[in-house]
Structures are given as structure tokens and as C-alpha cells.
Amino acid sequence: MPFFEAIRLALQQIWVQKLKSFFTLLGVMIGVTFLIAVVSIVGGMSAYMTDQVVGKIMAVNSFELRHRPNIQLGDHSEERRRELNRRPRIRETDVAPVAVALPEGVKYAVVGQDNLTAQSRYVARPKNLLIFTVSEDYFDIKKMAPARGRLFSPQEFERGMEVIVIGQDVADFFFPSLDPVGRELTIRGIPYLVVGVMEKQGSAFGISFDKFVIAPHKSPLNRFVNVHGVIDAIMIQTPSREGMLAAMESVRQVMRARHHLRPNQKDDFELETSDSALEFWNKIKGYLVIAGVALPAIGLVVGAIVIMNIMLVAVAERTREIGIRKSLGAKRRDIMSQFLVESATLSTIGAALGVATGFAFAKVIAFVTPLPAAVELWSVLVGISIGAGVGILAGVYPASRASRLDPITALRAE
Amino acid sequence: MSTQTVEAPLGMTAERQAVVEGAGTAPGKDWVIVTRGIKREYDMGGEIVRALRGVDLAIMRNEYVAIMGPSGSGKSTLMNVIGCLDTPNAGEYWLNGTQVSKMSDDQLARVRNKEIGFVFQTFNLLPRATALHNVELPLVYAGVPSVERKRRAKEALERVQLGERMDHRPNELSGGQRQRVAIARALVNNPSILLADEPTGNLDSNTSEEIMRVFESLADQGQTVIMVTHEPDIAAHARRVVVLRDGLVASDDRRSSFVEKLGIATPQL
Ligand SMILES: Nc1ncnc2c1ncn2[C@@H]1O[C@H](COP(=O)(O)OP(=O)(O)O)[C@@H](O)[C@H]1O
Ligand SMILES: [Mg+2]
């Protein structure tokens, strides 16, 4: 029997018993719902981690030379912690040799960072802030622009003047209903002139990215951020992703030489990329994906058992029909494929409904949480194919029973 | 068999006798059906039921044969064997010069599809399918494309005067109409034989006559027809009557002598 004929027949059969068919495909539907939902939640979290969390900290195609990792998700072993503590700091004297080793067109910025308490005359309470002292290309690399005011002039950078730009939260806290531009913020007894308020950076997991103060690297503020001659990071950005790997290798060689490392010694510095920052997340994601496969698998197994039973009942109920078809020349293969197509169609419909509900589920999650609903095409395709596959598997035994019925016995059935 | 003397069936011509006796050899092409010593036994939990005990039968192209006999004499079993729905335990069955008694399931299915048109007492229509779709079924399994299938199914329904009722389901049709749908279905793939097992068994006498007229006209057009019945006046429509008794052929007559013997009136045709 032609394939489309068989599908039409199967759809007819399914339609005749709508309610029963629905309950039959419920298992598969729930299984696929889980699959789509879990995959899209994991996908959503991934997108969130990549864009909202790490993306806010790390710029595109960039890496940072640090003495130890900045972004730490998860715990380190005691041994690893000790190793990290033994590492030498990155120093200002490292900047020039690293810069020389970088290919044409690569931007870099020196970064110092620390938490310091600040105070303004408009608010009684002082507050702890994240302070960055940066060199000129920092804003360009991070694609940060002022919402109000301006960035630092080359002279301000060059002379290390007492100017700062601040994040939205800092502006809101220290300058309530005031324009911070042109006003002062005092840190460690020195007043700094606010020249700009930066665009809102947003937040992740309830942690704001707008609680910062940025000063020129040569600013007096740097004295409180790092001991003399020490820096926290050199941020390096290449025009392309391939260039980034090459640049990383150059920087690695320069630093190994400067630290006099022998070939058998490991790096005693960190070249941190957004990928390495995501390493821990990728591990969690692995577990989530396993859960995301195991849960639907249970639903699908249950679904398969239900479909198999229903198909066995269908074969028993339709024994006479099978006899009639055989008497008219249906071969085993015809009967077999009729029932296989029927159970596959049933189960594929279940899978399609599962895709729809899974999709809806993901949308609801996206609505009530900050996670984006990233329903991925591959999960839809996998869901549908698994559905069809389950149907075929569940249908094999009933269908082969049907196909082996003796025509005379089948014709005699009620 | 030697311990049991079987009376030679009445009216069997020498020709038939000869073809039936040629064990192992293919009969000539005019013989549509030749059975040689067909046996069919059922094992009913230790007790062997011998439905057919060695049936010899030879039927030529264009014959119209009735098979009679009391209930349980093996008529249906013989029809099922001839219709390739069942396989004999022993003996030879030649259909159109090929031996089918040793074919596989799928080969038998192919023969049922191409060579046999079966009409049952209980119609055996698919209840949820329209008359047209029921008639299309043999063509579906023959792999005929949809458009041609519909055309041929329509033609077959028109041949049995059901052109107007193609879109009706069996439960919207009378008994006689249902049986005519079944006949259309049996004929749609141009089978070499039309088999009918008590086709009027579920019908009143007027409707039975109507169905008999359909068979009559098919036979007139050259269709080979074999029909089982236990009603003599139905059998009297056929041109040859085979009587089974206890799984054996008891007599095999031309209609004239059969009618004469039973003293029934020749039906009005
Ligand atoms: N499937 C079967 N299993 C057991 N016995 C059967 C079966 N089919 C037929 N028989 C027996 O074979 C004999 C002939 O049956 P059947 O061919 O149906 O006779 P008829 O059609 O002449 O009434 C009967 O005794 C019947 O009980
Ligand atoms: Mg019978």
C-alpha cells in the first residue's frame, strides 16, 4: 500500500477514536514536552550565561592576562588554591613587552580593580564600590559609552587627573535626583570629579553590573587599588576570533619567558577568555542535559508501552478487518506497515503536541524568569523523530502479530 | 484409500477424469481449477476433523458451477482452498496451470489479489469505508494508482447497478446492495474466477433472485463462477452442480440432469 494512503488511513483511524487516541499519545506528548522544555531552559540559561553574565564581564573576541582567574564559578581544590596564591602578580613592566608581541590591529587596555568605599556630600552613608583604573582603549574594547557627560580626554588619561565616570547605580545612590556630572565623589579622602555616567549594564542573578567607578589608570586612585607597579589585568581584543588564539599564544610565550618558566612547567598566569569563564557552566549544563534526556526518556518509555498495548487491542478489535484485507490480497508487509504507520502517526502527533506544549512551557518560563526561551530547531526535530521512532518501535510487535494472522481465522472473528 | 471403495462421481466426463488423474502434471490451459486428492484436516485438541477427504475437481474456463451439500460437508473449506485463503494438508491444487498448494503466504496473497474474487455470505465489507473505497481495496493492494483505482472501482459499481450509491457506507445500504458492492469488489481486479460462499445465505428470496441475476449475467459474459449453496433452487441457476458429502465429491452433474433428478422447475431467467 502506498505510504500516503497508509497515513491517510491511519489519520482516519485515529480521528474515529479521538479521545482514546489522545490518551494513547499522552505519554509521548509528555516526554517530548519535557525534552523541548528542558532543552530550551538549558539553552536559555546558556544564552543568559553567555550574553548576560560572562558577556557583561568579558568583551567580544577578547582575553585577559591575569595572575589568576577573575571569573570563578564553582570551587577550587585546596591544592589549586595554593598554586594560585603562589603566582606572581602581573606588573606594569609586563605591559610593554606584551604590547610589542601583539599583532597589528590588536587593542589592549591595562586594568586595575578593587573594592573601595566612596562617599558623596549628598548622602550620609558611605558605600563600597568596585573601582577600575583603566588605560585609554578600555571603553572601546568593552563597547561602553556614557549615557550622560563624557569619557576621559587623552590629557586626563595622560596626566592621571582626578576624574571618574560612574555606573547608574552609583549615580542613583550618591546623587539622588541630581545630575552627577560636575559633582564630586570622595574616595580615600580625595575628591574626584564625575565627568560621565555610563549606560546601564543590567544585572545577572540579582547582581548589578552598574555599581562601578572607573578612573584613568594613572589616577591617584590607582595607589589604593594596587601596590606600586602591580596591575590586575591586561585586556586584549583582536579583530577576529582566529586572531585571538594567535594573540593568546604570543602573550603566553612572552609571559613564560618573563617568568623564566621551563618547558615542563605550567603557566603561572591566566589567559582568561569568555570560554574559560564558561567552563564551569558547561559542566553544569552537561548534568542538566543528562537530566533533560532522562526525564523525557521515562515519559517516552511509558508512552511506548501504552501505545503498544493500545495497538494490541486495536489488532484484536480489527481482526476481521485484517481478515478482509488479507482475503483481498494484502500481504504481510501491507498489514504490518498499516499498523506501523498507524502507531508511528499516533506517536508523531503526540510528539508534535509535545513540541507545542514544550514550546508554551518555555515561553511561560521566559515570561516569569529572566531566562530567554531559546527553543532550538534541533530539539524540535529530535523530539519529532523520537516520537516517530517510539511509535514504530512500539508498533512492531502488534503489527507483526496482525500481519501473521491466518486469513480464515481472522475472517471468522467478530 | 484402498480399503474404502468410493463410488465414481456421477456424470464425470472422461476428459475431466483424465485431467484429475494426471497427478504431478500441469493441466492444459483451459482448466482454471484442478484439484487432485485435496485433503484438509483440523486438529481439534487430539480429535482430527476431516473437512476434506480427497477432493478431485476440474473446472474449465467460463464454467458456472454450484457446489452443494449438507452443512458440514466441507463446502466452505473447499472454497477457502480454491480461493487460496487456506492450504490443503495433502493433494494438489492447480490454478491456471500453476500449482498453488505449496505457495508461501505472500505468494498466496498475490494470487488472491490477482486471480480470485471472493464473495462471502456475510459480505465482509469494511464498515467505516464507503462502497467506493471498499471496491478500491483490491486495487490498493495491486498497487494501482489512485486515479485509475477510483475510475475502475466506479466502473465495477456501475456494472452491478450501484453507480448512484458509491459514497454510502455499508450500514446505509440494503443487504442486496451490500452483496452487490461485494461482487463489484470481487470483480474489480478482473479475477480469473469468482468464488461465492453462500452469497444469498443472508438475503430474502427476492433479493437472492436479484443477486442470482447478477451472477447469471456475469457467467453469460464469460466469467468463471463457482458458488456454494445449500439451496437447490439457487444451485439450479448454475450450469453444473457438484455435490459434496462428508468431504468427498458425491456427484458432479450438468444442470439439466441435476434439475431432472431433484424434480425442480427450471428457474425463469
Ligand atoms: N477451522 C476449523 N477448525 C476445526 N474444524 C473445522 C474448521 N473449519 C471447518 N471445520 C470442520 O470441517 C467440517 C467442514 O466444515 P465446512 O467446510 O465449514 O462445511 P460447510 O461449509 O459445508 O458447512 C465441519 O465438520 C467443520 O466443523
Ligand atoms: Mg459453509
Image (spheres, rainbow, N blue to C red):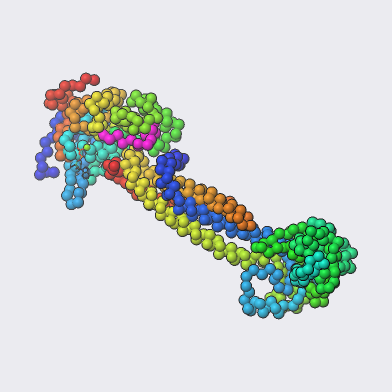
Q: Give the residue at x 21% y 37%.
A: B75
Q: Quadrant of residue A130?
A: bottom right
Residue B127 magenta-highlighted: yes
Please give the range of residues in magenta.
B121-135
Instruction: Give the overall secondary structure of the magenta segment.
Output: loop
In this picture, is A46 found above or below A333? Answer: below
Which residue of the protein is positioned furthest toward the top in this rendering? B268
Front one among A210 and A340: A210
Q: Quadrant of ligand 2?
A: top left
Residue A158 in the figure: left or right of residue A288: right
Residue drawn at point x = 81 percent, y = 67 percent: A120
Q: Position of residue A150 (x, y in %)?
A: 84, 59
Please give the count of numbered marks on the rendered protein: 0
Q: Position of residue A332 (x, y in %)?
A: 36, 45
Q: Nearer the viewer, residue A310 or B43?
A: A310
Residues B147 and B1: in front is B147
